Amino acid sequence: MKLRCLLEPAGCAMFLARIEKPYFLICLVFSQLLFLFFLYRRGTYNGYQGLFGSNPTWDYSKTHDVYTNLSFFTPDAEAAKTQYCSMSSPILVGPITVTFAKPPSLKKTQLKNRHVKTGGYFSPKHCFGRYRTAVIIPHRNRETHLRTLLYYLHPFLQRQQLHYAIFVIHQAGSGTFNRAKLLNVGVREALRYDDWDCLIFHDVDLVPENDYNLYMCDEQCPKHMSSAMDKFQYSLPYWRYFGGVSALTPDQFMKINGFPNTYWGWGGEDDDIASRIRLAGLSITRIPLSLGHYKMIPHGRDPGNEENVNRNSHLQNTERTWRDDGMNSLQFHLLSREKTALYTNITVDIGDAPVSLTKVNRFKFF
C-alpha cells in the first residue's frame, strides 16, 4: 500500500476515499462472502480445482450397471498378485444405474460377489490394495434397505480396488434409536479386526450413484461424501450439513472424541459432529455436488426413531460437552459378533433413552 502511494499518489488518495465510505466496505465484505459460499457449495475439497482447473460434469442420464467390469477380478489373476494396485483404478465407470423396484436377495448378491470373503471382507485379486476402508452401517429393522445397499455397495467398492470390510451395527430391542452411539460402537468393533486407513459412516438407506466418489479419507480433514442427495434435489440442504455418508481417519475420529452418545431419536447428531470437527481445530472437506450423488431408498419414519425434541438444547451445549460425551464415555453390552457372507454383524444393547425424553416423544407422537 505504501509503495502504491509513492508511485501513484492520486490513485492512492482515491482508494483511501473509497474505503472510508461504509457502503464500499459492505459491498467488499458481501462479495467475499459470496465467494466463500460458492466454494462451500461446490465442495471445499475440490472448490479451487473447479474454479481454476478441471471439474468433470457428469451425465447422469447415461448410467452403467453397477456390476460392469467386475470380470476384471478373476481367480487366475491372483497368481500374478505381485504389486500394488494402480493409484487410480482403470475400471471405474462413473454414473451408476440405481433402481429400487425389487429388493435383491442376499443370495443373489452373494452369487454376484464371489470373491467377497466371510464377514464382508474383500481384497483385489490382481494386486495389493493400497487403501484399507471400513464401512460402518447403523441398523435396526431395515433388512430390505440393507439388502439393496449391499447389492450396490460391494461392486462399487471392488471397482475402486480397495481392501475393505462392511460392518453392520444392529441395535437390539425396540427402544429409541441412537445412530451416533451405534457408530461409536462400530468404530470400537471395527478396529478389533484391522488397522483401517479410513472409516466410512454410512446410512443404510443411501446408495451412491458415481464410483468416482472414492471411499477413501482425506488425511487432513473429515470428508462429507453425500453432498447431493435426491431427497434434497441433489443440493446441499444447509451449510453445516454433515449427514448421510461421511469419512474420517481413525486419528480424526479420536481427535473429536468420536460421536455424541446422547442423541436419542431422529436429528441433531450430524450438526453436533460438525461442531466437534470445528472445536477440535479441524475443517470439513466436501465432495463436489456433481460427484456426491446419492439416492435415498423411500421409507417412512421408523417406530422408535421419532424426532429428537431435545436436539436443539443438546446442540447449544456441544462446546461444553464434546470432550466428555463420546468414545471416552461409550458404554454398551455386546450381544453377538457374527460373520455373514456379505458383512460382519455386531448386535449390541446400547441402553435406553432417558425417561424424560421417552415421555416427551410418547406425548408428541401418540
Image (cartoon, rainbow, N blue to C red):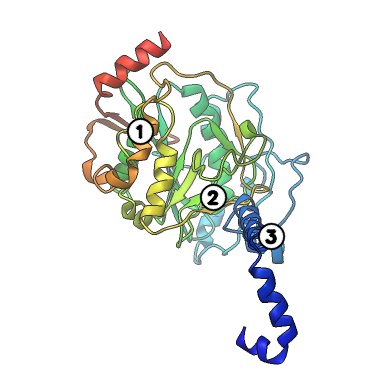
Q: What element does badge 3 sit on?
A: helix
Q: What residue type is labelled 3?
A: Gly
**Residue on which disc 1 sits:** 313
Residue at (52%, 40%) from the top-left corner? 114
Query: Could you give the CA–CA distance between mark 1 and mark 3, rounded to whole angstroms?
Result: 38 Å
Query: Could you give the CA–CA distance between mark 2 and mark 3, rounded to whole angstroms?
Result: 40 Å
Residue at (31%, 53%) from the top-left corner? 254
Q: Is residue 354 above or below residue 49?
A: above
Q: In this view, does 8 lie above or below 304?
A: below
Q: Along the horizontal axis of the image, is 251 left or right of 218?
A: left
Q: Along the horizontal axis of the image, is 227 left or right of 253?
A: right
State the quadrant of the C terminus.
top left
Q: What element does badge 1 sit on?
A: helix
Look at the numbered discs 1 and 3 and tell me whether their residues touch, using CB distance below 8 Å.
Answer: no
Residue at (44%, 40%) from the top-left corner? 271
**Residue on which disc 2 sits:** 75
Q: In the rendering, at what x and y percent does residue 252 appear? A: 37, 56
Does residue 254 appear in this view? Answer: yes
